[in-house]
Image (cartoon, rainbow, N blue to C red):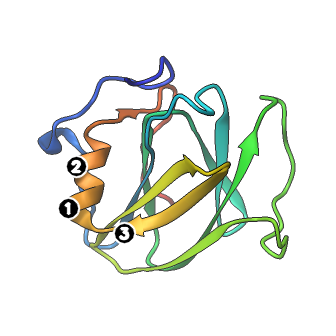
Amino acid sequence: MASCATGPRPSPSQLPVVSSDKALIYLYRTGSVAGAATAWKVYANNRHIVSLENSGYYPYFTEPGRITFAKKMQVNPLNVGVVSLTDPKLNVLTLDAAAGETYYVRFKLGLGKVTMEQVTAEVGLNQVIRCGLLRGVEVTAEE
């Protein structure tokens, strides 16, 4: 069940596609009753890009190259600050993104901690279409 923070679930043909000069990384959070009211702040190369809500996805368009993702649990909506990628408690995932390619990064709560992992296109697409685009999120290619 999608949370109220997400929009309608897309069909595969409604999902954005990547241009030949950008990389597209679908960041998504699988639905779970545990932790459903908590947003997870997601950073790419130390820059906050989105707060993932339960059962939500975000298509992140970026320049090709190495991208290091980090996440931080956001309990208080006013929680601000910089994430240090050297923090040993921080879970990070590094992806080498190529131009014209699409990737999928899944975030999920399991055994008391949030994990993120790159998944195959088949798995990712199947799960993204069960999520909703986060409300209030603009989908634009990065400058």
* Residue beneath the point at 24% across and 53% down: 125
For marks 2 and 3, the one nearer the N-term is 3
In the rendered view, does 125 fall on the left or right side of 11? Answer: right
* Residue beneath the point at 49% across and 58% down: 142
Q: Mark 3 points at which residue?
A: 22
C-alpha distance separating marks 1 and 3: 21 Å
As drawn, 76 above or below 46: above
Q: Which of marks 2 and 3 is in front?
A: 2
C-alpha distance separating marks 2 and 1: 6 Å
SS for callout 1: helix
State if disc 1 and disc 2 touch (CB < 8 Å).
Answer: yes
Q: Mark 1 points at which residue?
A: 122
For marks 1 and 3, the one nearer the N-term is 3
Q: Tell me where residue 78 appears, x and y as whole percent.
A: 84, 30
Q: Name the residue under label 2.
A: 126
State if disc 3 and disc 2 touch (CB < 8 Å).
Answer: no
C-alpha distance separating marks 2 and 3: 22 Å
Q: Residue 54 — which label? A: none
SS for callout 2: helix
As drawn, 116 above or below 127: below
- Which residue, as the protein is rendered here, is positioned at the far front? 111
The image quarter in which residue 129 lies: top left
Residue nearest the viewer, comparing 110 with 19: 110
* Residue beneath the point at 67% across and 32% down: 38
Q: Tell me where residue 63 appears, x and y as whole percent.
A: 46, 72
- Which residue, as the protein is rendered here, is positioned at the far left? 13
Pointer 2: residues within 10 angstroms few (<14), some, or many (20+)? few
Q: Which amino acid does label 2 sit on?
A: Asn
The image quarter in which residue 18 lies: bottom left
Q: What residue type is labelled 3?
A: Lys
